[in-house]
Image (cartoon, coloured by chain):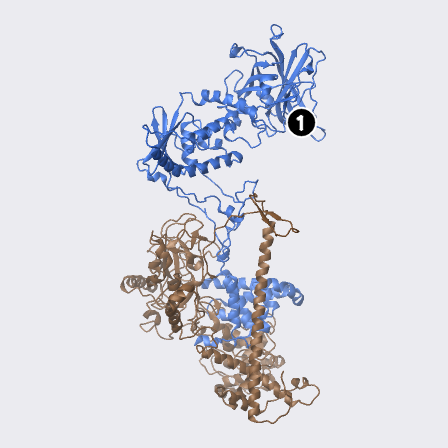
Amino acid sequence: MSGASCKANGAVYPASSAVMNSVKKPKMEQIQADHELFLQAFEKPTQIYRFLRTRNLIAPIYLHRTLTFMSHRNGRSNARRLSSHLQLTFTGFFHKDEKPSQNSENEQSSVSLEVLLVKVCHKKRKDVSCPIKQVPTGKKQVPLNPDSNQTKLGSYPSLLVSSNEFEPSNSHMVKSYSLLFRVSRTGRRAANGLVNGEANENIDVIDTPSRKKRSSSHREEGETTETFVAQMTVFDKNRRLQLLDGEYEVSMQGMEDSPVSKKRATWETILDGKRLPPFETFSQGPTLQFMLRWTGDASGKSTAPVAKPLATRNSDSSSPMETRTTVKESVSTDIKTRKEQVLCEPRQKLRIFYQFLYNNNTRQQTEARDDLHCPWCTLNCSKLYSLLKHLKLSHSRFIFNYVPHPKGARIDVSINECYDGSYVGNPQDIHSQPGFAFSRNGPVKRTAVTHILVCRPKRTKPSLSEFLESEDGELEQQRTYVSGHNRLYFHSDSCMPLRPQEMEEDSEDERDPEWLREKTATQLDEFTDVNEGEKEVMKLWNLHVMKYGFIADNQMNQAIMLFAENTGAHIVRRNLCRNFLLHLVSMHDFNLVTTATIDRAMARLRQIKEELPDAEEEEQQQGQALVSAGACNGNSITSTGGKQGKRTKSALTD
Amino acid sequence: MVLTGKRSEKGPACWKRRVKSEYMRLRQLKRFRRADEVKSMFNTNRQKILDRTDILNQEWKTRRIQPVHIMTSCTADSGFSEFSKQVIPLKTLNAVASVPVMYSWSPLQQNFMVEDETVLHNIPYMGDEILDQDGTFIEELIKNYDGKVHGDREGVISLSQYSDNEEEDEEEEEQQDFKVEKMEVCDGKEHPEEPRKEVLKFPSDKIFEAISSMFPDKGSTEELKEKYKELTEQQLPGALPPECTPNIDGPNARSVQREQSLHSFHTLFCRRCFKYDCFLHPFHATPNTYKRKNLENLVDSKPCGIECYIEYPAGEVAEQAKTPSKRTVGRRRGRLPNSSSSRPGTPSVSSETKDTDSDREGSRAALVKCSVLVFCAEGNSRCQTPVKMKLIGEAEAVEWSGAEASLFRVLIGTYYDNFCAIARLIGTKTCRQVYEFRVKESSIIARAPAEDEDTPPRKKKRKHRLWATHCRKIQLKKDGSSNHVYNYQPCDHPRQPCDASCPCVTAQNFCEKFCQCSSECQNRFPGCRCKAQCNTKQCPCYLAVRECDPDLCLTCGAGDNWDSKNVSCKNCSIQRGAKKHLLLAPSDVAGWGIFIKEPVQKNEFISEYCGEIISQDEADRRGKVYDKYMCSFLFNLNNDFVVDATRKGNKIRFANHSVNPNCYAKVMMVNGDHRIGIFAKRAIQTGEELFFDYRYSQADALKYVGIERELEIA
C-alpha cells in the first residue's frame, strides 16, 4: 500500500509503541498494566475496523464520495463539465537522452507540438472498423527541457480545446475522445538510438486497459526529425471523463519503434535493452509536461471543482487491478500534496489529538496526527467536519466527542458500550443464500427486493457543534428507532421464510381453508338419514357460503343467484335440480329469499341446462375442474350410503 | 375361510368352540386389516412428503449456488497404500438461526364450536423431568376425564370402548357365520360359491344359540336373530335407513309430504351462519314458526300460455280457492285406482292415507270420479262443471312420479295457488296438470296464511318510543348489572311475549333477528340510525358493545357495499373480516410474535381472535395442561364459553402479552355471537409487534399466561 497509509496505520495502531502521555517515569509494570488495559479496550474494535478497511479497499460496498458529508471528494460534476473548455498549458518537453547539453543550447530550445483531438465514432453497419476523426486543435512550440524554476506560469504555451468539440456531432455518434500529442524534434540523431519500447502513457488513475496506444503514421522523411507521440483518453466510451484537472506528465514514444506485436504487449519500460521500473520512464524518457484544466470560459479559471482526482482516489480506494501503481503513485502523491495544500487546507495545519479513554474513562492516552485522515481506515477526509462525521458513522463501536483545541481539535475516543452489531440489512439475504450471502468472491444473486425509499431528511447545516459532548449525553447514543419490516417473516402454516414477493398476499388468511372445506363435507357425510342428493347440494352450498362469507340476510338473494351461476352447470350435470329447488324453498321458508329469487334462480338453471352441450361427454372434463373446490363429488354416491355415518339430523334437534 | 367341512356331531360345546375360534379369527383379520390400513396411510403420507421434498429440491437446484471460498481442504486417508488420499475442499455454510418452536395448528377465520372431550386424547408430554418430578399431574389429569384415555383398549380404563369394538367384531362375525352356515348347506356340491348368490337362507338357530352362550352379555338368541336380520337387510343394494327420505333426483324418489322432503334442509340449515350443519351453532331452529313477512305474488294474474289453466272456466276455481275459506275441513277425494298419483305400493301412499284419515267424512262426498271441488264463496256448495269434466278426463292419463308429487307438495306450500309458477318449477307438468293434481290433493294443502291479522300496521311513532326505551335500557344494562355476559341463544316460546321467562331476557341479552318472537318484541335490539361511522358512543350499537347488524342498521352502511372494503360504518369489521395483514416472525420478547404489515390508527380493528369455542368446564380441563406447558391460548368469551386458539386459530394467537400493550381486546356481540376483536390501543407503525394485555381480556384466565408474563415485564 501507499506510504501514506502505512504511516497512518503505524501511527494509529495502539499495539505499536504508542506515545504515552505520562510525564513522569512510572514503573515499568505500571506502564505495562496500563498498556494491557488500553489494548483490552481498543484492540478488538481496531482490528475489526482495519479488516473492514482492507475489505473496502478491495471491494468497496459504497464510495465515500457519494456521502453528503464527503461531497468534496467528488471531483466530478457532469453538468458543468460538458460545457467547459479544455485548457492545456504545456510546461515543457523533457528528453534527457545522452548528453543533453551538447546541442540543445541554442537551436534546440523548443520542440513543436501538435495536438490532435481524436474522435472514435460508433461503428456503422457498413464500416469495417470504427471511423476515426482527427481534429487538429493547434500547434505550439514547447520548451525543451526547461528549468522548472525559471519560467513563470504565464509564459507557457497553452492551448484551448473548445467545448464544442466534445458536443455530439451530427454525422457520427462519437464513442470516445482522446488527445493525441505529437512532438516533432529536429535533430541529427537516428531515430532508433533510443528504444523506448512501449512507453507508458497512462497516467491517470482510472485507466481503462482497453485504451490503446495509437502511433500515428505520420512520419517525416527527413532523418533529422524525430517524432514522439502519446495519446490520452479524455472521455471513454461510456462518456466518462478520464482527465481531471491537474498536472500531467505524459511519457512519449518514438514513432518508429513498435517491434512488439500488440497482442503480446505488456506494459514494461525498457531502456537500452534493460527493463526499467516504470517510474524510471519519467526520469529518462521523453515526457511532455502540461497542466490540464477545465474552464468555464476561454480565459477563466478552473471550474472543475476541487479536483484532486488522482490523489484521493488512489489512496483510499485503490482498485485491485492497479498495474501501474508506481507511476500513479509518483504522480499522484505529488499532485495530491500540492492540491491539498492549496485547496483543502488553506489555513495552517490542523493537529488532531486523539484522546483514548479507557478503564471506565479513568485512564487516557493521547495521540496526535497532523492530517485529517481517519486513523482506522486512512481515509482522507479533508475536512474536520467530514472526519468527525465519518468517525461517528463508520466507527460506531467507539464514541467520539469533539473538543475544540487551540492547535486544531481534540477527539475523545471511548468504547461504545451499547454498540449493537446485530444485522440490520435485508433479512432475506441471510436466508435465501445461507453461507454465501456476503461472499466476496464475485457477484451474488441477491433476493430481489424493491423498496421505494423516499427520504428527505432535514439537513442541518454542517457544524462542528454537533460533535460536542451533549449535555444529556446518553440520548444521543440511542439507536434511532427503525420502523418497517426489518425482519424476516415466516409463513404461519409451514414456518418457511416469507419471500419478499409473498409479502403482499396473505396466504394463510383465506376464509375457507382446505381443511375446513373438507371438514364440512365429511361432517355432512356422517349423517345417516340425509340422502346423497341433499348432501351434495348442501355441501355445494356450504362451500359457496364459506367462499364468499355471507353474513347478512339481505345478501341471500344475491347469494342464491351467484350460487346458481357458479354451480349451475355442476348441478345440472349431477342431476341435482330438484334438490337445488328444495334448498331454495327451504331458504324461502326461513324467510331469507323471495319467491322471485327462486323463480330467477331456477330459470337460470334451466338456461344453463340448455346451454350445456352434452352432459355426458363434458362431465369427465369439466366435472373435475368445477368441483375441485369441494371434495364432495366423488364420494357422494358410493360412500355416502347409510353405513358410514354416525350422526342423525334428528339427534341434532333434541 | 377355515372350514372343517365335516358334519361332525352338533353338540353345543362344539358349536361354542367354533364360535370362539371364528371370533378369534375375525378379530385377527380385523387386526390385520387395521395394520394394513395404517401401513397404507403411512405410505401415502410418506409419498406426500417425498413429493414435497422433490419440489423443494428442484427449487434448490435452480438456485445458483456460488462456489464458496475455499478456506481449507479436507483430506481422508484410508490407511492403505493402494487407495490414494481423498481431498475435497471444505465448504462451510453459515448457520441459519433456528426459529422458535411452534406446535401445529389449523388456520381458521371464524370460531369453531367443539364439544367437550370425554376422553383424554393423549397424555401430554412435557419433557422427562416434568414427568419424573410430578407424576401426580398425569394421574390427576386422567382423573379429570374419569379415567378415560383415547385408544386405551387393553387397559381397564376404557371398558366402553372395548365393548363397542367387540360388538362390531361380532357383527362381522355373524355375517361370517352366515357364510359358514351356507357352506354347510352346500356341502358336498361342486361349487361352493354358487349358493351364495341364491336367495339368502336364514342360518340355523344353533348358531345363534352358540353365540349367545359364548357372549351372554350380547343378548338372547332372539335378540341376536333380530340383529342379524337387521344387519343382513342392510346389505341390499340401494337400501337406506328407513328414516331417510330417498333422493328426490334419484330413481327411487317417492312421493312424500312436504315436511319430509324438506326435513333435512330444515333441520340442518343454520339460519345464523346460512350453512348446513354449521361449525358454530349446535342447535338450529327449524323454520316452522317463522312467519312470512309478506305474501309475495301468490298468483299470476295473467295466464302463462294458451294452455294455462286460467284460460279455462275452471280457472275461476283457482281464483276463488285462494280466498280464505271458513271451511277448515280439508276435502279429499278418496283413493281412486285410476288417478292415483303415486305408484302403487310405495309407502308414500300409505302415509297419505294415514295423514288424511281424519278427512274421511269429507272424502266420502267426493266420490265422483275426476270430480272437482269448487268452492263457491257464497254457497259453500260443490258443483261440477261439465267442461271441467271433459278436461279432466284428458288429464287422467298423466302420470305423476313420486318426485313430482313430492315437489308439488313442497311448492304448494310456498307458492300456494300459483300453479303456473309451480308448473314452471316442476318443469315436467303443465299448469293445468298441476292444477288438477292440486285439486286431487286439496285436502292436505295448507291454506295461504291470511294477512297477519295479529300485527297491527306499524306506526312510526311507536317505533320511536321503542327506540327511546331501548336507549335507556342499554344505559341501564351498562352500569346496572354485573360483568357477567351470557351466551345468546335464540328464544323460541310461541305465543308468549318475551317477558321474564324468556331466556334472552334472563340472560340479559337482546332478542335478535334469529329469535322466534315477533319483530315487534320489546326486547329486540332495534339497530342504529347513524349516518356517521358508528365509532362513538353516540351509536347505540357501539354503546351496547355490539357490531352493527346489516339487517337492522340500515342507515349507517353496515348492510351495503358488500364488494368493496370501503364501508362507511366502522362498526362492522369483525363480521366482515376486515382484518389487517399480519406477519409472523420470531418475537422480540418471547417465542413467536405477530407483526403488523401496515400502520393502523388508534381504535382501528386489527383482527378477530378466533379459535375453538369450548365450554368453561372443558376450558378448565384443558387449562390444566396448558398451565403445565406454560403456554395458553385460552380466552374468555362469556360466562358459558371460552375461545381456545391452541388447536385452531388465526395468526393473532401469536400476539404476546404486555403490560404496556399496543392493542386491546373487546368481546362484542356480532349478529348474535360473541366474538373477540383485537383493536389498536394507539397508532401502530409498520412492522410493529402486537401485544395486548391478557389480564383484561382473559379475566381470570391470567393464570395461563405463563412464559410471556414472566419474561416480559422488563
Query: Does residue A93 sit above or below B598 in this rendering?
Result: above
Return the residue at label 1: A265
Query: Does residue B267 sit above or below A77 in this rendering?
Result: below
Specify the quadrant that holds the N terminus of chain B: bottom right
Left/right placement of residue B136 relative to residue A219 reads left
The outermost residue toward the top is A106
Between residue A41 and residue B619, name the one nearer to us.
A41
Question: Residue, x 54% and y 63% (percent of image)?
Answer: A563
Q: Residue B664: horizontal and vertical position, in percent? A: 36, 55
Between residue A443 and residue A506, name the one nearer to us.
A443
Asked whether residue A561 appears in the rendered view, the answer is yes
Which chain identifier belongs to the blue chain?
A
Q: Residue B439: horizontal and vertical position, in percent? A: 54, 80
Question: Residue, x 62% and y 29% (percent of image)?
Answer: A209
Which chain identifier belongs to the brown chain?
B
Query: Does residue B313 sit above or below A96 in this rendering?
Result: below
Between residue B346 and residue A144, name the one nearer to us.
A144
